[in-house]
Image: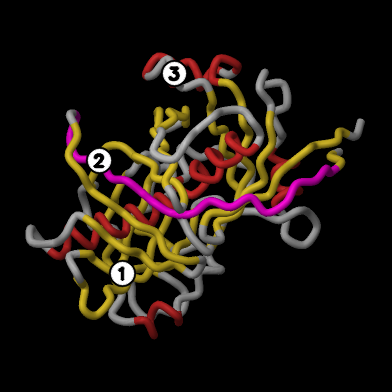
Amino acid sequence: MAMTLQFTKGHGTGNDFILYTDPAGELALSPQQVRALCDRNMGIGADGVIRAVRSVSLPEGAAALAEDADAEWFMDYINADGTAAEMCGNGIRVFARYLIENGLITLETGDTVPIGTRAGVRDVQRSADGFHVDLGRWTLEDGEPLVRVRELKVARPGQGINVGNPHIVVALADVEELADADLSYVPHVDPEPEHGANIELVVPRDPLVKDGIGRITMRVHERGVGETLSCGTGVAAAALATRHWAGSSAPHNWRVDVPGGTLGVRMFAAEDGEHVGLSGPAELVYTGAIELA
């Protein structure tokens, strides 16, 4: 039986999503349906699907409510290949705008809303020109995995960073190398991460620090998606890895250029350790309806 899905298309610096509302948790899409929707030739086209569901209406939401009873809404994010993802830094900003524009929450400039995710509750603050999300505590992973990327001649060492989802950041020599990398193929990582990882390729700007702000350029291959124009958590991971490589004098504020635009990253102290935050725009492009098999 066919089903009509009311949806909204949105993006954060080109990282694009299909969003829909399912407060009672009665309309979970199958992996096949997600893949069909995200297909850029035969469907709407997107890097993933986001379902707005009340935390009380799904099992994963129980942990969110236990962490923060005010986390009414849960961002159920599914990658374009139909697999569930822990977090999405661009997606959660777009999700916040979606909740606002659909009258599901009220959020004035400067106000903050807690949102449930599979990585835990994340606080999103509305700003004058977008949204800022506290991605929480981050982890520097041990080891030095080797990453092979098509069209780069040799394998490069990577730095594992976890910001609620797994990343491996690789430093390249210059923008020419960055442009040469073919991220239409999945990079090969040795040893292979148990649950996969997003791979970020990073080039420092010259100078690296200007007016107290670190500056890098990045491309990304997202786990379960492929190359995307942007990856919010990947941007945060790239800034964290670059600061780690740069040493103790490196700044805590960063500007990261991705193919889809520019995002801001800030590292700051919190009661449970250092947190990393992400700032940037969130746009809703159009609404529509589509029949699903």
Who is closer to the viewer here, 33 or 136? 136
Residue 23 spot, x, y in % from top left: 66, 22
Q: For the N terminus, which image quadrant?
A: top right
How is the rendered protein coloured? Answer: secondary structure
Query: Which residue carries the number 2 mark?
Result: 275
Q: Horizontally, is 101 left or right of 107 in the view?
A: right
User: The residue tagged with tag 2: helix, strand or loop?
Assistant: strand
Name the mark on residue 50: none
Residue 154 spot, x, y in % from top left: 33, 77
* Residue 282 within the magenta-colored segment of the rendering: yes
- Disc 2 marks which amino acid? His
Tell me whether the residue at label 1 lies in contact with that at label 2, contact meaning CB atoms closer than 8 angstroms: no
Tell me the magenta residue range. Answer: 272-290
Counting other residues with Cα less than 10 Å from the Cα at mark 1, is it few (<14), some (14-19), or many (20 or more)?
A: many
What separation in Å lies between label 1 and label 2 (alpha carbons)?
20 Å
Q: For the C terminus, which image quadrant?
A: top right
What separation in Å lies between label 3 and label 2 (alpha carbons)?
21 Å
The tag earlier along the polypeptide, 1 or 3, is: 3
Name the mark on residue 216: 1
Q: Horizontally, is 126 left or right of 252 in the view?
A: right
Name the mark on residue 70: 3
Name above or below for residue 289 compared with residue 281.
Answer: above
Which residue sits at x=37%, y=46%? Answer: 166
Residue 194 spot, x, y in % from top left: 40, 43
For the stretch drawn in magenta, the main secondary structure is strand
User: The residue tagged with tag 1: helix, strand or loop?
Assistant: strand
Name above or below for residue 221 compared with residue 91.
Answer: below
Task: Report how many numbered discs are placed on residues in the image.
Answer: 3
